[in-house]
Image: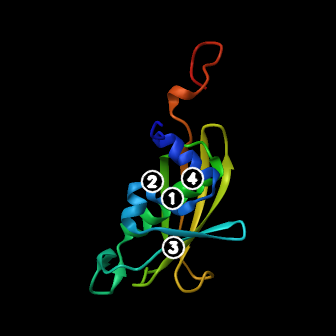
Amino acid sequence: MNEPTEREKFREAAHARDVQRLIGLVPFSSYLGLQARFEGEELIFTLPFQERLVGNSAIRALHGGVVAGFLENAAVIQLLIVEDRGRVPKPVDFSIDYLRTAKTQDLHACCEVLRQGRRVAQVQISCWQADRDIQVAVARAHFLLLPRKEFAPDSAGQAV
């Protein structure tokens, strides 16, 4: 029996809504120690605190790049579940607003797919720590959903 391709692994995990397996298939998500769980239909992401994630030891704060990486990876996993295409979405742009210091404790996030087309999706990500109503950061991102070579050409032979 043939080993499943990477695309088949992603598609199977997404179809089964096996978020932890999807996280294991995205190397940086695994490296960060990203975790996720469903609360009803909402997917809640958690980045457990690790000492190695501290960026400013003087004020004991998580590194801003870690916060941004966590939010971008949460959006990727969210889209993998929503899209069920078996391909990792590619970031087109990512914008983050840091609202307060990320303390040395677990981070949590949830994503909302604001707009989803054939090729591009827009996701908004909210991040908090102990209290969901007190956000640490919010981010917006656009992702390319399919590689350009898979787009159907129009009548002029151009990818659409």
C-alpha gap between disc 3 and disc 2:
17 Å
User: According to the image, label 3 marks what residue?
Assistant: 46
User: According to the image, label 4 marks what residue?
Assistant: 13
C-alpha gap between disc 4 and disc 3:
19 Å
Nearer to us of marks 4 and 3 is 4
Disc 2, SS: helix
Residue 25 position (above or below residue 30): above
Specify the label residue 109 is tagged with: none
Q: Nearer the viewer, residue 1 or 77?
A: 1
Residue 113 position (above or below residue 42): above
User: According to the image, label 2 marks what residue?
Assistant: 25
Image quarter in which the C terminus is found: top right
Could you tell me the amino acid type at mark 4? Ala
Give yes or no for contact between labels 4 and 2 (Cβ–Cβ under 8 Å): yes
Could you tell me the amino acid type at mark 1? Arg
Residue 117 position (above or below residue 104): above
Give yes or no for contact between labels 2 and 1 (Cβ–Cβ under 8 Å): yes
Which tag, 4 or 1, sits closer to the chain's start? 4
Question: Dot 2 surroundings within 10 Å: few (below 14), some, or many (20 or more)?
Answer: some
Nearer to us of marks 3 and 2 is 2
Which tag, 4 or 3, sits closer to the chain's start? 4
C-alpha gap between disc 3 and disc 1:
15 Å
Disc 1, SS: helix
